Image (cartoon, helix red, strand yellow):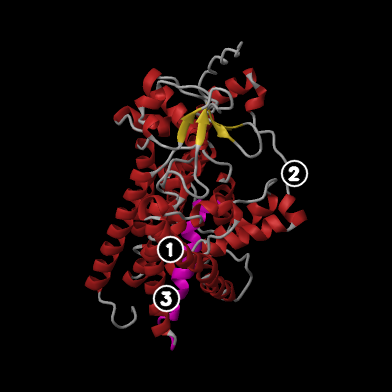
């Protein structure tokens, strides 16, 4: 039973209100999204497909060298441009993927969580600043949330009975994620661990067919690598780097704890905290807001880590007997979900330990839902204790602070403004038909510099400027 004061109708209204607030903020972010180097690299692939039918068989350059395998990047960016020739069209698809991910997760959890639990999930996942901030601009990592939702859905639906099509989709989703980001390894490991411990029953023929489709989609990439071996991710560092140096492994654990919190500080996350309102509200208002928001992000934000820390401590204290024990056939849905969260966490820790590079915040976005569920399940239990009143105040406080920070990000974060502190700007070596065709020439962050300019790797290199003979 839910704690007193939580009627079904009231909870439905709360979830609807939270959904509409997140939807409105996200749409503002999409409308205000800016263009920089990564966005131009992606848009170039999509424009070549929409304009010339050319499918680039590889994605963005990776941190390990080379490029991501496969043509999915060109399709995800190019198909929206066929419908709407605007640089924000692919970004709208990213945002719609986040909407679909939330709706799919909410539907999947409907039979496991109470109405109160689903409302908590709406607060900590749908209004999550980590998720919403990365839903409003174009970037390959921003698609990962959708693959996490597909992972939970296909695993949950196969808890008791294997399904050809669900296993096919499950493997296809992981293979598609591989073409966008190397962090697909987290979901792949989670799949192995969950199947091993009896959390779902894969249909091996369906999984094999999914793997065959993924392999077939990589044939053009393999041919491209054969012609140009530099496209193959070569790798920096070494396998097991996190286990040896420890810091990369600890960093993976810290990001798991930070996803349900309001702690965004750090060099790699400066785009979320470097806010500037001078161009929209004036320098004096900007100075005041920076002080207030700086207090929230630098002092209040880190303090909110206490909640996920307590939640994860509670999550693992509930393991009374062997951690490696298989899930009993008669285990409740709640026990199943608790185990799912634990094994996904293990997959993230193992991935962080084995990764040859140090994990960054966005590499765990595919398991953000699982990190959030640890907090949701903890607060649901806490609501039935003598701390129930405090437990009911926590999500309300989180929601109001998250909304305040999200509105600030929508108008002051570098991805959603032109100019100001830590602004995103890119100088191109030459003009190109793609710029006016997609409205990029009207974006203040893109300029032309024929001498020192940069150029997207998918577009043919422009001719070098003629030397000055004066």
Please tell me the numbered disc located at residue 120.
none
Where on the picture, by quarter, is residue 435? Answer: top left
Tell which residue pokes out farthest to the front in this image: 470
Give residue 367's position: percent from left, percent from top: 51, 55
Q: Is residue 244 left or right of 13 when viewed as pictured?
A: right
Give residue 141's position: percent from left, percent from top: 50, 44
Sequence-earlier tag: 3 or 1: 1
CA distance for labels 2 and 3: 42 Å
Give residue 296's position: percent from left, percent from top: 48, 68
CA distance for labels 3 and 1: 24 Å
Looking at the rendering, in which quadrant would you find the C terminus? top right
Instruction: Tell me what residue is drawn at x 45 percent, y 67 percent.
Output: 292
Q: Which residue is mark 2?
A: 238
> What are the residue bounds of the magenta stretch?
364-386
Determine if residue 462 is in view. Answer: yes
Most frequent secondary structure within the magenta stretch = helix
In front: mark 3 or mark 1?
Answer: 1
Q: Foreground: 376 or 270?
A: 270
Is 379 in the magenta? yes
Count every numbered label the image shows and give the total: 3
Q: Are marks 3 and 1 in contact (CB under 8 Å)?
A: no
Q: Which residue is mark 1?
A: 289
258 versus 46 height, above or below: below
Q: Which residue is mark 3?
A: 394
Instruction: Tell me what residue is drawn at x 55 percent, y 45 percent.
Output: 184
CA distance for labels 2 and 1: 44 Å
């Amino acid at each position: 039973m839910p704690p007193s004061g939580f009627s079904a109708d009231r909870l439905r209204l709360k979830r609807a209100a939270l959904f509409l607030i997140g939807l409105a903020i996200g749409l503002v972010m999409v409308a205000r999204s800016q263009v920089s180097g990564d966005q131009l690299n992606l848009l170039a692939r999509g424009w070549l497909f929409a304009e010339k039918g050319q499918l680039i068989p590889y994605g963005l350059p990776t941190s390990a060298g080379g490029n991501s395998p496969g043509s999915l990047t060109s399709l995800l960016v190019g198909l929206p441009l066929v419908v709407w020739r605007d640089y924000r069209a692919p970004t709208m698809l990213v945002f719609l993927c986040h909407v679909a991910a939330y709706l799919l997760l909410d539907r999947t959890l409907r039979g496991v969580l109470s109405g109160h639990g689903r409302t908590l999930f709406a607060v900590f996942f749908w209004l999550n600043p980590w998720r919403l901030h990365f839903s409003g601009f174009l970037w390959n990592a921003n698609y990962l949330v959708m693959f996490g939702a597909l992972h939970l859905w296909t695993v949950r639906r196969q808890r008791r009975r294997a399904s050809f099509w669900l296993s096919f989709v499950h493997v296809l989703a992981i293979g598609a994620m591989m073409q966008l980001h190397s962090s697909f390894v987290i979901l792949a490991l989670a799949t192995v661990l969950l199947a091993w411990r009896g959390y779902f029953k894969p249909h091996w023929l369906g999984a094999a067919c999914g793997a065959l489709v993924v392999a077939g989609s990589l044939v053009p990439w393999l041919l491209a690598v054969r012609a140009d071996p530099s496209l193959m991710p070569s790798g920096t560092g070494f396998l097991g780097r996190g286990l040896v140096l420890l810091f990369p492994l600890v960093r993976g654990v810290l990001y798991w704890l930070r996803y349900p919190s309001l702690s965004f500080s750090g060099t790699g996350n400066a785009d979320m905290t470097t806010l500037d309102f001078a161009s929209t509200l004036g320098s004096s208002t900007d100075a005041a807001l920076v002080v207030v928001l700086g207090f929230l992000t630098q002092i209040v934000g880190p303090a909110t880590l206490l909640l996920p820390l307590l939640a994860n401590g509670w999550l693992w204290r509930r393991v009374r007997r062997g951690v490696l024990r298989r899930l009993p056939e008669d285990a409740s849905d709640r026990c199943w979900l608790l185990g799912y969260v634990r094994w996904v966490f293990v997959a993230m820790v193992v991935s962080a330990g084995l990764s040859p590079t140090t994990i960054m915040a966005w590499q765990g976005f595919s398991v953000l839902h699982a990190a959030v569920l640890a907090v949701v399940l903890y607060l649901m239990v806490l609501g039935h204790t003598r701390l129930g009143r405090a437990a009911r105040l926590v999500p309300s406080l989180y929601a109001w602070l998250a909304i305040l920070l999200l509105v600030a990000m929508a108008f002051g974060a570098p991805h959603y403004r032109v100019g100001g502190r830590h602004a995103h700007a890119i100088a191109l070596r030459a003009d190109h038909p793609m710029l006016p065709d997609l409205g990029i020439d009207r974006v203040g962050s893109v300029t032309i510099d024929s001498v020192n300019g940069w150029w997207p790797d998918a577009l043919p290199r422009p001719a070098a400027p003629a030397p000055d003979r004066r």
